[in-house]
Amino acid sequence: MKFYNREVELALLSQGDKLKNTRSIMTMLIGRRRVGKTTLALQKYSDDLTIYLFVSKKTEQLLCEEFVSEISSKLGIKVFGAITRFEDLFEYLLELGKTTPFTLIIDEFQEFYRVNPSIFSSIQKLWDLHKNSSKIHFIACGSVYSLMKKIYEDIHEPLFGRADFKIDLKPLKPSVLKEILLDNDSFSADNLFDLYLLSGGIAKYIETFVLHRVFDIDSMIDFICSENSIFLDEGKNRLIEEFGKEYATYFSILSLIASSKTSRSEIESILEKNISGHLARLENDYNIIKSIKPINAKVNSKVQKYEIVDNFLAFWFRFIYKYQSLIESENFQRLREIIKRDINTFKGKFLEKLFVEMMKEKQHYTAIGSYWERGNQNEIDIVAIDDINKKLLFCEVKLQGKRANKNELILKSKKLAQAYKDFEMEYKILSLDNVKDFI
């Protein structure tokens, strides 16, 4: 699949590459797994050499041996003597950068915590000592959000304040999904929604669907639920290591959120335990869920719900994790039948999410969110506020527009509308038929 979008990120990397001719530059590149960080970092934005090092689960000595081999091969030089400490290797690279400008990419940078946590202090010491005389663009890539934020943004950590640039790589936007589908002669409103629903804009998932040319929901479900599918273990592969020994509790919480148990009280009543700490870590440390409040709620309001940020993980916990017994018994046909039976119920919330994403791309509104009152009364799917032109848009979202009633929407919005008396009000019923109007 060709490389799509990322013009802003490439421009920033290119800027860092140019600036390294003045002094060494450090870029922090973070993003969830599979979003395309490595592919971005390896794009051609420099005429200088690039050294790519991957921090795998090995001892420091074995990693250094592997790194030395890669450096020797890439730069065409022989490294004399045995280097068994990364501190010595990093100093060697900084010295080399004084005569040979190059880009250094270290992938899964946060894994140095497992290898030897003191490596970060060594990098800080050597960077401060050599950065003004060396000419390296050092790109530190990481997918464990909490650890990368800690490394670079915790004032008590050695690399705090050392990054010259920060890229928080986001999933591909709906307009890019449209471009991908057009390039594959498969664009339709349904296919756009289905691709968004099951990929969430994550580059690796999109690449896999494009490779196998599955773009409609039935084909995607058949593909995901096939024997030996890489998608069946995706949730475990992405999260068990991050969660550690408490993964079972986290998985239970995420499974309940994916099944529409979205309030803390609902989840705690089922699990029969206090989960406030777990929810805080899922949101702030792992960046897997986010709390949502009514659009006009006060900052300290306790009226809130939770949703899983990643579309595919929401799907995985709703269907794959929930029906793990069918996978273990290799009853993939029954799994497909259940998903296809229940998928429309699951789809509704994500059609709302798609419209919100498309509205954000248009940049016509200063705030976009949802609205409800205590006890989940008077729920409104989308409320978009334009403070500049004093306009307020209320939207009801249905897979089939004929099932919605505009008069009911107007009644539900009455209390919120009172807070914006001098605004022009607009009411819309949105369905799949309206997708092409926004994209």
Image: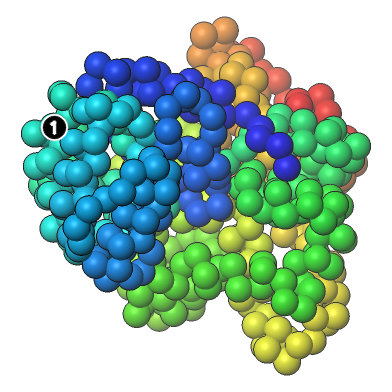
Figure disc tally:
1
Residue 224 at what x, y percent from top left? 75, 67
Q: Name the residue under label 1.
A: 130
Position above or below: 388 against 346: above
Secondary element at tag 1: helix
Look at 87% across and 60% down and name the residue there: 219
Q: Along the line of sight, which residue is nearer the eye, 120 or 275?
A: 120
Q: How is the image coloured?
A: rainbow
Q: Along the line of sight, which residue is nearer the eye, 61 or 424?
A: 61
Give, as a three-letter code, the residue at label 1.
Answer: His
Disc 1 packing (10 Å; few <14; some 14–19; many ≥20): some
Q: Is there any visible trace of residue 278 in the rendered image?
A: yes
Position above or below: 392 against 298: above
Q: In which quarter of the image is residue 398?
A: top right
Look at 24% across and 67% down and name the residue there: 61
Tell me the quadrant of the picture where the N terminus can be found: top right
